[in-house]
Amino acid sequence: MPASRAVDSRPISAVAAAKPPVKRHRLTLQDRLDVIKFCEENPHLTDGEAAWLLRRKGYLTLSQSSVWRLKKDKDNLRALAQNPNELRFKRIRQVEFPDIDQALQKWILQSQGRRSIRLTGDLIRGKAQCFAKLFGHPDNFLALSGGWLSSLKARMGLRQYRFHGEAASAPIGTLGAEIQRVRSITQEYQP
């Protein structure tokens, strides 16, 4: 006598009832630092309890293993947070030549402080080539393409501004002298 099969109550159809998809959520660097801060403020909580409380605060997909991993990587995350532009990113951007990237970031910040320099894509590319020569990289070390430039702008939080009308044609070099001239004229009048 053959063994009898257990009766299966599932439908015979190949199409099974679909489960609702799990919504994935990736934390920004700022969110990760907030989780670490919460865990440091509440050291008595286990990772599972901390994850449960954080889920109630809005971090819906945070699990015990995620909390543990964030606590383990807290030194690396804090080092990345030194650049305030990185706080809004969900994925940490890796660059091929970090020495050139850091030098360009410092130069761009200094150039933004001086109003006499208008940053253009060609100017940034030229400065990247100068830094490459200073650091001893070969001439064709990196394709300074439009994609490279746009990703640099995204990392730095740079935006394009178009000057219209008289602002586009104003001579930037004589701006300081003109400001002084206008101030000397307006000081003669009382408000």
Image (spheres, rainbow, N blue to C red):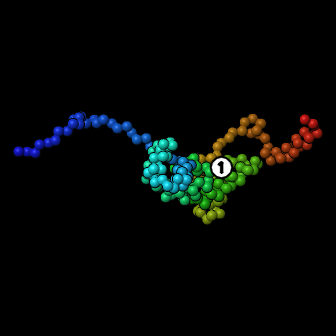
Q: Is residue 140 visible?
A: no
Residue 55, percent from left and from top: 47, 44
Residue that numbered label 1 is attached to? 122
Q: Residue at position x 57%, y 47% from top?
A: 88
Question: For the N terminus, which image quadrant?
Answer: top left
Rendered view: 16 above or below 72: above
**170 relative to 142, above or below:** above
Observer-nearest of 107 and 76? 76
Choose between 155 and 62: the one closer to the eye: 62
Q: Residue at x 58, y 62 (%)?
A: 138
Q: Position of residue 38 (x, y in %)?
A: 54, 51
- Can you say whether 61 is above or below 42 in the image? above
Asked if one can make out residue 31 in the rendered structure from this viewpoint, the answer is yes
| Residue 134 x %, y % | 65, 63
Where residue 32 appears, as percent x and y from the top left, is: 53, 50
Residue 184 horizontal side relative to residue 84, left or right? right
| Three-letter code for the amino acid on which mark 1 is drawn | Asp
- Residue at the spot x=34%, y=38% of the render? 19
- Looking at the rendered structure, the secondary structure element under dot 1 is helix
